[in-house]
Amino acid sequence: MLRFLFPLCALLLWLPMAGLQAEQQEPSLQERTEAWRATLTAAQAALSNDFEERSLAEVMADLRRLQVETQTVRRDSRARLREVERTLERLGPAPAEGEPPEGETLRGLRQELRQAATEFSDRASIAEAAEARAADLQESIAAWEQERFRSRLAELLPRPWMPEVWHRASLEGLEFVNALISAPVDWWEEHRRAGDAAQALAVLIVLPLIGLIAGWPLRKWILRRFGRGQETAPTYARRIVAAVADGAANAVVPVVIIALVVLALTLQGLLTGQMALLVYVASAALAAYLVFFGLTQAALAPYQVAWRIVPVDPARVRLLLGAIRITALVAVAGTALLTLMLYTGRHTPHLESVFFLLLTTGIGITAGWTLSPAYWITSVEESQDGGSVEEASERLADAATEAEQDDTRPLLDVARSLLRTVVVIAPFGALLGYGRLAYFAQSRLLGTAVLIGLGLLLRLAVRELIQQFYLNQPIRRYGAAGVRAPSQSERSVQGMIFWTGLVADLLIFVPLVYLLLLLYGVPPTTLLLWTQSLFSGITIGGFTLAPGNFLIAVLVFMAGLIATNIVRRWLTRTVLPNTRLEFGARSSIAAGTSYLGVGIAVLLAMGALGLDFTNLALVVGALSLGIGFGLRNVVENFVAGVLLLIERPIKVGDWIIIGQHEGTVRHISVRSTEIETFDRAAVIVPNAELISTSVINWTHKNRMARERIPVGVAYGSDTEQVAQILLQCARTHSKVLRAPPPVALFVGFGDSSLNFELRCFIGDTDDFMTVRSELHFALEKALREAGVSIPFPQRDVHLHRPARRDSTRPDEGDSGTTQPST
């Protein structure tokens, strides 16, 4: 029997190692090592030669490819090594001396497993070393890029005030212009000889029409859905959305046309040589200018002042719009020419010096004109008022006088003044020979202002869209003075608006930070390394703690909560009301959907954080051990606290009654809940009692409360009149809700009175005792003025004394009776 059992066990142990046979088809360890060493050596050589023979992008692509490959090999080798070690553990130790020797099959399997473990360990170590070397080379390349960038910025160019500099720059500029002009001619001749010139011309004619047909309906839909309507006094958030929609709609048609033309020409291989570079740069510059043109016109709104979103002088808004357009045209055209100059190799020192002087001077004049204080005021509301230039000057003078008296200036005005100062003095740096540094400071500051402005406008627009999405139903108002009965669903919606807005802010401003870093010259290699370090983190045991993973986990959890809320609202408002299920069943389905969604969101967040779900068994085991050692009450209160925080039957601020305690919930922890009584005493209640016992929560679903005021009137009173008096007192009170309406009930015949009861609702439980007292005063006064008496109970009390046993006179032994009335 043992003769067949050992081979069977060996076969079962060998099955997990079936994947080892696939290693024969993969490259050997020596081949991988030689390939990695060649890649690292070539990258080091390219760095040492300042990337003269190989481009930096090519080297970085090879290093990233090597890094990905080494990470894959290292992880796979570590996993297979653990698998081999577990198999060796299941085999047990080898027989010692004096014990029966193991069979040939097991001995061969053990030896093969040991060889595989050694190979996997060596492979993981070599891959880890190659990965570390690739990371070091990337850091060295990033440092080289930063040093090269700083040196180029600080490089002194020929001073443009010298005549020979202008002479050489004019000659080199003419050569550059001739090269740009000859590029389309050469391209046309090339394709005419190849016979596809007619095809290119057809593309240039047909695709703009296709773009117009595709973009025009989209433009109309955007304007109709989000654009400016007929409102005479729209809110500021509504104006933000309309400005973004109007700017995007007016720019989308030409941008779509440009993108279609360029994409079609590229896919068909019709863009070649310098013509391709010229088309790409010109298209990007034209699209950027059109988008900026559309957004600027929408924000200033020169013809629809009610929709203006920036505080500009109403009398000079058209001049400001022209100044902004000229500034954008100069900046975009100059940047496009500079890009062409760099990529065509025409950026000689003399040409750069004169070009930077002209460009910074043009931008300084136009941007200084745009940032002039004569165009900007401090209030958007004042910007919506008309007026002449003289009136605007008077308002600006008055505002300046008030600012001098207050000795304070708005932060926006200070930032605008500093920006204008830097932009205006930048040409003097170019005149001294530091044209690159001057253009860098000037363009980056203006680009920062534009990006931050666009980011803030986009944030406001997204916030408005989020509020419109969640608050798509009107809020009902009740009561004589507009008192509203708040509900828990409205508070939940406000919370979802906050969290959704927070996620939107992260999605807007994180890319904005990356764009600003790229704008200020941080090399892409450095940004890549920063991102890798952000997501690599530190390893503690088998868990890697990384800030990037934590951020992703938070975003995943928030997105899961938002999606859960959307699905629940869809079920509650659209699906479940159309079914035949009763209200309780519909509520249970909605609650179950919420719990399921939250659970899935938690699991996804844990997966994004990098937690191993197998470790949950350790947590459960430790919890069971703690319960076994007498921590049952602690664990019970802990679980109850978690249920309270998730299910939220009791919330901070609720008015509850549990047992003999009544008060307001001040704090909920995972072990106990603090209740503050109306005598300002703190009662600490274990969470398990709040779960296992009945709790009266006055503010669970909403803060509405019902007042029940019993009133007794004398027999013979007009009951209809009494009911009208009760209703009139309730209706005239400002804090009594009209929906549900107050009710006066004739509840029965008492011993000495006709018993009535006034029932009405108030919107806030905080006013419970105050409203009750005020209603008592009002009812007593109204009944007294109407001549309706409120009786008090009357009783006959008989005092009986028993006769004495001794002989007395007859009159001394009689018992007396009295009939006092109370």
Image (cartoon, helix red, strand yellow):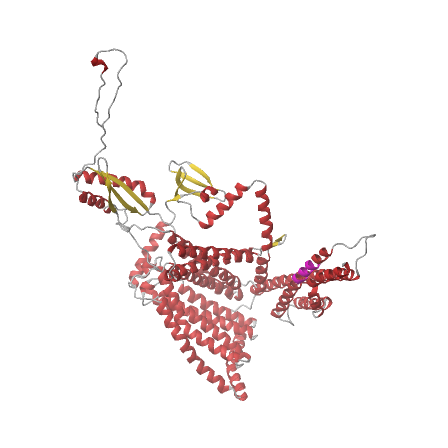
Q: Is residue 292 at all visible to an observer of this figure?
A: yes
Question: Would residue 675 appear left or right of 805 to someone viewing this image?
Answer: right
**Image point 54% across, 42% down: which residue?**
632
Dominant secondary-structure state across the stretch colored magenta: helix
Q: Is residue 376 at all visible to an observer of this figure?
A: no
Q: Position of residue 133 (x, y in %)?
A: 67, 62
Which one is in front, 490 or 540? 490
**Image point 49% across, 70% down: which residue?**
335
Q: Position of residue 71 (x, y in %)?
A: 64, 63
Vertical position of residue 363 compared to residue 603: above or below: below
Vertical position of residue 161 compared to residue 88: above or below: below
Looking at this rendering, what residue extends furthest in the right direction? 98
Task: Verify whether residue 587 appears in magenta.
Answer: no
Which one is in front, 368 or 228? 228
Image quadrant where one finds the C terminus: top left
Q: Quadrant of residue 212?
A: bottom left
**Image point 32% across, 68% down: which residue?**
303
Q: Quadrant of residue 712?
A: top left
Q: Position of residue 820 (x, y in %)?
A: 21, 25
Q: Quadrant of residue 567?
A: bottom left
Question: Would residue 417 appear left or right of 64 to someone viewing this image?
Answer: left
User: How many marks are shown on the rendered structure?
Assistant: 0
Image quadrant where one finds the N terminus: bottom right
Task: State the extent of the magenta-drawn residues as a range.
Answer: 75-84
